[in-house]
């Protein structure tokens, strides 16, 4: 009942699109699945519809540049299926590739691929703090998404809290769009520049343009927006929606202010659910403070024929995602069509461009590493939003020195809700590590259980009917 | 410092290991549980937690009916209700021919002296399960059966064992065993535990442990799949199964639908991993939507497969080893051991302390499966 | 509440909790609901608290609403002419 193709690419962001363009040049049969309605991924969400006009100016040149890649992707022979959400992947039991189960138009479908490329991107690191479940609190990335897809900005006193390039970029975009920022609560801890000065110089050397841009944004914002440095703790309050927030700076006293919106950001982390579910080996990245699948130099996971490209394999940004997509395409081609040998020089060029980007990245990782308190919130903080499990409940589960997030899950229901632990995975790992005096790297994340995305009983039932009637 | 000498070592911290430990502790023995990962990591935590006497093999009924009585007073045993509700179990007939097979079953159990199973008609079925599809014609019903919450049950047994002075060593994998005049010596990596008596409650890995202890018991492995949906408003009390279908369907206290019944996924016992096969699980989803058409649009949020040992006659192995002194087996529940949890503790207490039991366990004898000496 | 930075050229009409509402082509249901005055996207099925989108990229499931009779993540669903959107203030009902 299932179709067969050479390559299934999941995700039509920079990584997935670039891989599709490169691999289709060699005549591979390719299907690209993405749950969004249009190609572009997170960074170039809706870029096709925002080619010009006010919004395009607000979002800036880097955003507009995505349209060119999207056009080439649309023109390439890969079969692109939008609004197709992948809910399960079955590895081919060592034979390479596997089966991809997805939902399109409320129909469950199965597709078999000789290779699978996961280009499923990243998610914002969820920084749990008291009150973060109140309507009015959302991720800065989330606010940027609604700017891209809805062309809209938050109204009323808007507070921005966090650190990292995306926080500054969005603040700039918000101001360009005519929004007002009541205050910027910078959560970068004090004393980060000096110890990382060498990395700073390195970044300036290898990535001068984006670095200078970042410095310019910071300066511009500090001059025009009420700026509170070294914010160490945050609480949001209100009944059914955010009304006030309280922040505390390092060594300072709590300050309470009125707020209609609080946008938070502590960097992004790879979306590890698909690779965790498949059982691909994972490695802790100390530099980025997160897990990422173990990949070889082409992006192949520990499972044969299953590749990862882009931020799903480690955070490196859109330019790197494109290069890693192309590299994965080369390896996939070599595997499926040994006759079509890729040019050595081309590969060399891809690698050298990639290594410059990675070299520039180190500074951002170190300078904007989330503060410890963002990972170990106070007792009254909800950690699992879906099931309403608090840090106190998790801390109460001390057990003979053996901490396992899966046990926390079983005993508290944390991670059992519809998001399947995507929002609380790191929180629970951190708290478990804290309880048992170990490190999140040893504790690990929850086991990811299928489906990757909820599917209705009726939608699944159809797969059986197809079988018996076939 | 971990205590290394005890009266009894229990291998396996699933519910049966905990239940056995609890009864022995209460009888004044010192007990240490050795658990490879953590309490309830495998079948016990993956269980559908149905508390069902209905439709069990007649030879299991004496102990199963006793266990049912214990579930009704489970709070007395472990200080918590374990989320147990006696909301009944139904085995639905979709065709008139199904009714006949169910009636035969009732006759069989009645003649064996058990009166808990009864037939109900269409109207009664509709009253007990209003959302049931209109084509269903009747059901077998046991009103005293029901279901519990597996995680709450685990927690209750765990807390009770600890309160009774038991020692639970999690993250402790038994890698070897040795016997001499003073008893058993179990190797766990570089640690050693000693006791005159060893209870093998190692679930899917019980065959391996039995071999270490000198018994070679042929066992199979099951990887029964389960699925759980988002929470929905309360609409169903009893647990529902159906003639000719691999289905068990219930609504939990939290409102989620918990759907299982024994559809088989894939297990990699060595790696302690199990895999869901969606093309097979689809059959369960289909059964659920055909029996309860209104749940079509309810979303599945989680699925899993739990690994457990099975025997060729689908009945557990409970009893003393006839070859290895001081070794007792309790495993092989073949996908329906949750209900028996409270009673296995009593049986093993009898066997270990009194060297005999009045409970009917002859058909669970380890030797029936053709045990050979593993030496 | 959110506000548009420019008036969209093309629009569609959808129904939110039974009331017709204009939306702009290309936006998602979550974008639209973020501009509605009522607070929230429904209530959390476990705790009953009012919830609203947190991630806008399909991760958190805080944006679940009923769209044309099915639960959907509003942040992944583009608006379409005639769509019926319902916010759920409790757990889904299973009609007998
Ligand atoms: C919120 C946010 C904002 C960012 N903003 C910026 C920025 O302004 N500037 C910058 O340089 N970098 C930014 N980044 C980083 C940048 O987006 C990434 O480096 C880059 O886009 C990575 O590309 P990718 O192809 O790996 O992933 P993505 O662009 O995320 O593409 C992954 C695609 O996979 C799809 N997908 C995921 N799971 C499934 C599934 N189960 N079924 C079907 N489809 C699925 C998604 O819909 C998505 O389209 C941002 C990241 C985030 C998360
Ligand atoms: S807002 Fe997070 S899933 Fe839609």
Image (cartoon, coloured by chain):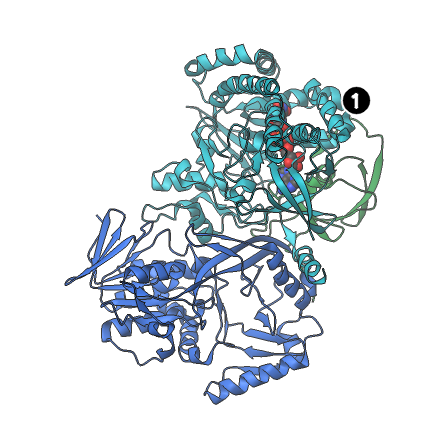
Chain colours: A cyan, B blue, C green
Residue A429 location, x and y as percent?
A: 44, 40
Residue A108 location, x and y as percent?
A: 69, 51
Near-viewer residue (A143 or A352): A352
- Residue depicted at x 41% and y 23%: A251
| Furthest residue toward left | B181
- Residue depicted at x 66% and y 68%: B291
Depicted A21 relative to depicted B123: above or below:
above
Q: How many labels does the image show?
A: 1
Near-viewer residue (A50 or A76): A76
Q: How crowded is mark 1: few (under 14 residues within 10 Å), some or many (20 or more)?
A: few
Image position of A105 (left or right of A143): right
- Residue depicted at x 70% and y 61%: A465
The C terminus of chain A appears in which quarter of the rendering? bottom right
Is residue B297 visible in the rendered image? The answer is no
Image position of C21 (left or right of A448): right
- Residue depicted at x 67% and y 23%: A174
Dot 1 falls on which chain? A
Depicted A50 relative to depicted B338: above or below:
above
Near-viewer residue (B35 or A405): B35
Is residue A383 visible in the rendered image? The answer is yes
Residue C47 location, x and y as percent?
A: 56, 51
Residue A249 location, x and y as percent?
A: 46, 24
| Furthest residue toward bottom | B111
Depicted A82 relative to depicted A18: above or below:
below
Q: Mark 1 points at which residue?
A: A52
Q: What element carries label 1?
A: loop
């Amino acid at each position: 009942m299932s179709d067969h193709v050479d390559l299934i690419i999941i995700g039509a962001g920079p990584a997935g699109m670039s891989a599709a363009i490169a691999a289709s040049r060699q005549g591979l049969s390719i299907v690209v699945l993405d749950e969004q309605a249009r190609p572009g991924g997170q960074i170039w969400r809706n870029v096709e519809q925002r080619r010009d006009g006010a919004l395009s100016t607000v979002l800036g040149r880097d955003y507009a540049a995505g349209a060119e890649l999207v056009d080439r992707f649309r023109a390439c022979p890969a079969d692109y299926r939008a609004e197709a959400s992948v809910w399960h992947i079955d590895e081919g039991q060592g034979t390479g590739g596997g089966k991809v189960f997805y939902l399109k138009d409320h129909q469950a479908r199965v597709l078999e691929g000789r290779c699978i490329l996961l280009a499923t991107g990243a998610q914002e690191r969820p920084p749990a703090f008291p009150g973060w479940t109140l309507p009015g609190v959302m991720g800065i990335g989330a606010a940027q998404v609604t700017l891209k897809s809805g062309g809209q900005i938050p109204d009323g006193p808007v507070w921005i809290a966090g650190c990292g390039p995306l926080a500054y970029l969005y603040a700039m975009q918000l101001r360009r769009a005519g929004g007002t920022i009541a205050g910027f609560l910078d959560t970068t801890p004090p004393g980060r520049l000096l110890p990382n000065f060498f990395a700073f110089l390195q970044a300036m050397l290898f990535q001068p343009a984006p670095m200078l841009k970042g410095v310019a944004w910071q300066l511009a914002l500090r001059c025009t927006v009420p700026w509170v440095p070294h914010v160490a703790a945050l609480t949001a309050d209100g009944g059914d929606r955010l009304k006030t927030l309280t922040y505390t700076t390092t060594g300072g006293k709590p300050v309470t202010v009125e707020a209609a919106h609080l946008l938070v950001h502590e960097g992004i982390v790879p979306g590890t659910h698909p690779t965790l579910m498949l059982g691909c080996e994972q490695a802790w990245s100390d530099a980025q403070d997160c897990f990422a699948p173990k990949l070889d130099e082409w992006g192949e996971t520990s499972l044969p024929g299953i590749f990862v490209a882009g931020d799903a394999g480690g955070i490196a940004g859109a330019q790197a995602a494109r290069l890693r997509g192309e590299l994965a395409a080369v390896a996939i081609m070599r595997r499926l069509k040994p006759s079509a040998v890729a040019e050595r020089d081309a590969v060399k060029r891809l690698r050298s461009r990639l290594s410059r980007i990675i070299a520039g990245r180190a500074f951002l990782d170190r300078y904007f590493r989330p503060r410890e308190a963002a990972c170990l919130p106070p007792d009254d903080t909800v950690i699992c939003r879906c099931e309403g499990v608090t840090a106190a409940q998790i801390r109460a589960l001390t057990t003979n020195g053996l901490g396992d997030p899966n046990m926390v899950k079983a005993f508290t229901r944390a991670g059992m809700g519809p998001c399947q632990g995507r929002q609380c995975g790191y929180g629970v790992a951190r708290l478990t590590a804290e309880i048992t005096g170990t490190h999140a790297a040893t504790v690990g994340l929850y086991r990811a259980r299928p489906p990757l995305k909820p599917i209705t009983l009726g939608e699944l039932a159809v797969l059986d009917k197809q079988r018996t009637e076939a | 410092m971990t205590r290394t000498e005890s009266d009894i070592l229990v291998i396996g911290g699933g519910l049966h290991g905990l239940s056995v430990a609890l009864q022995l502790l209460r009888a004044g023995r010192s007990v240490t549980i050795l658990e490879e990962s953590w309490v309830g990591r495998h079948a016990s935590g993956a269980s559908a937690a149905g508390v069902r006497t209905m439709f069990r093999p007649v030879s299991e009924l004496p102990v199963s009916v006793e266990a049912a009585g214990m579930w009704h007073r489970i709070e007395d045993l472990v200080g918590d209700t374990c989320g147990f509700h006696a909301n009944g179990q139904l085995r639905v007939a979709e065709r008139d021919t199904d009714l006949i097979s169910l009636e035969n079953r009732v006759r069989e159990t009645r003649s064996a002296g058990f009166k808990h199973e009864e037939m109900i008609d269409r109207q009664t079925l509709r009253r007990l399960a209003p959302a049931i599809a209109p084509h269903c014609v009747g059901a077998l019903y046991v009103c005293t059966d029901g279901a519990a919450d597996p995680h709450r049950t685990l927690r209750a047994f765990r807390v009770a064992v600890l309160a009774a002075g038991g020692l639970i060593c999690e993250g402790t994998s038994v890698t070897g065993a040795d016997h001499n005049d003073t008893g058993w010596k179990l190797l766990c990596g570089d640690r050693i535990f000693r006791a005159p008596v060893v209870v093998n409650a190692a679930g899917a890995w019980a065959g391996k442990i039995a071999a270490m202890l000198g018994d070679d018991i042929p066992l199979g492995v099951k990887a029964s799949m389960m699925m759980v949906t988002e929470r929905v408003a309360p609409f169903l009390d009893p647990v529902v199964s159906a003639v000719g279908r691999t289905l068990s369907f219930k609504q939990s206290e939290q409102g989620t639908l918990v759907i299982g019944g024994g559809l088989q996924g894939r297990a990699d016992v060595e790696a302690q991993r199990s895999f869901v096969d969606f093309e097979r699980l689809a059959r369960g989803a289909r059964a659920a939507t055909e029996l309860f058409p209104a749940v079509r649009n309810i979303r599945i949020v989680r699925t899993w497969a739990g690994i457990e040992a099975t025997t060729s006659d689908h009945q557990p192995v409970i009893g003393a080893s006839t070859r290895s002194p001081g070794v007792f087996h309790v495993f092989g529940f073949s996908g329906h051991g949750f209900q028996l949890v409270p009673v296995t503790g009593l049986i093993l207490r009898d066997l270990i302390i009194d060297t005999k039991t009045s409970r009917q366990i002859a058909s669970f004898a380890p030797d029936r499966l053709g045990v050979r000496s593993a030496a | 509440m959110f506000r548009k930075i420019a008036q969209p050229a093309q629009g569609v009409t959808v129904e939110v909790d039974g009331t017709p509402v204009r939306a702009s082509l290309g936006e998602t249901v979550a974008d639209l609901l973020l501009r509605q005055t009522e607070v929230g996207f429904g209530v959390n099925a476990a705790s009953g608290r009012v919830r609203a989108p947190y991630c806008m990229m399909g991760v958190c499931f805080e944006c679940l609403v009923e769209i044309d009779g099915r639960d959907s993540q509003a942040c992944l669903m583009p608006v379409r002419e005639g769509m019926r959107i319902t916010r759920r203030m409790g757990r889904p009902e299973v009609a007998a």
